[in-house]
Amino acid sequence: MTPEIAARLAASEIQLAAQAKDYSMFVRGSCMALVHSAGDRFISIGSSGILTENGLAYLVWIDGRAMLSSHGNQVAADEVQVEEIRGFSLMLKAALDL
C-alpha cells in the first residue's frame, strides 16, 4: 500500500482489518468490504456490508427495494443503513483510487 493510499484511508477513518493473498478487508464502524488486489495494486471492491445483530449482511436491491442479505435471510434496509454503506463504499473507492 502506498503512503498516499494509507493517508487517504486514515483521513476517511477506514482501517485495513485483514489481508490474504489476493484480498484485503477494510472496515469503518460497522461497515466492511473485501477488496481484490494483485501485488501492490488494488483492483476492485466487492460488495460492502454492515454488521448486524445477525452477523454480516450485504446491501442488495430486490425489486427496487434495499435489503440486507445474510446467510439466506433478507430484511429491509433503512435509509440510515443504506447511506452508511454507500458512503463507506464511495470513500473506500476514492481512497484506493478505484
Image: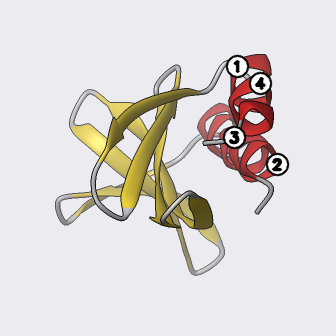
Closest to the camera, between mark 3 and mark 2, is 3
Amino acid at circle 1: Ala
Instruction: Pinpoint residue 65: horizontal percent, then vertical percent.
Output: 61, 66
Decide: marks 4, 3 in contact (CB < 8 A)?
Answer: no
Q: CA distance from mark 2 to mark 4?
A: 12 Å
| Residue depicted at 77% across the width and 24% down the height | 7
Callout 3 touching callout 2 (CB < 8 Å): no
Q: CA distance from mark 4 to mark 3?
A: 9 Å
Q: Position of residue 84 (x, y in %)?
A: 66, 34
Mark 1 to mark 3 CA distance (whole Å): 12 Å
Marks 4 and 1 close (CB-CB < 8 Å): yes
Residue at which label 1 appears: 10
Mark before the other along the chain sequence, 1 or 3:
3
- In three-dimensional space, the C-alpha distance between marks 4 and 1, rounded to whole angstroms, equals 5 Å
Q: Residue at x 35, y 48 (%)?
A: 57
First along the sequence among labels 4 and 3: 3
- Whether 15 is drawn above or below 63: the answer is above
- Disc 2 and disc 1: Cα gap in Å? 12 Å
Q: Which residue is mark 4?
A: 7
Residue 73 rendering spot, x and y as whole percentages: 23, 59
Q: Nearer the viewer, mark 1 or mark 3?
A: 3
What label does residue 61 carry, if any? none
Q: Residues within 10 Å of mark 3 (few under 14, many from 20)?
A: few
Name the residue tied to disc 3. Answer: 2
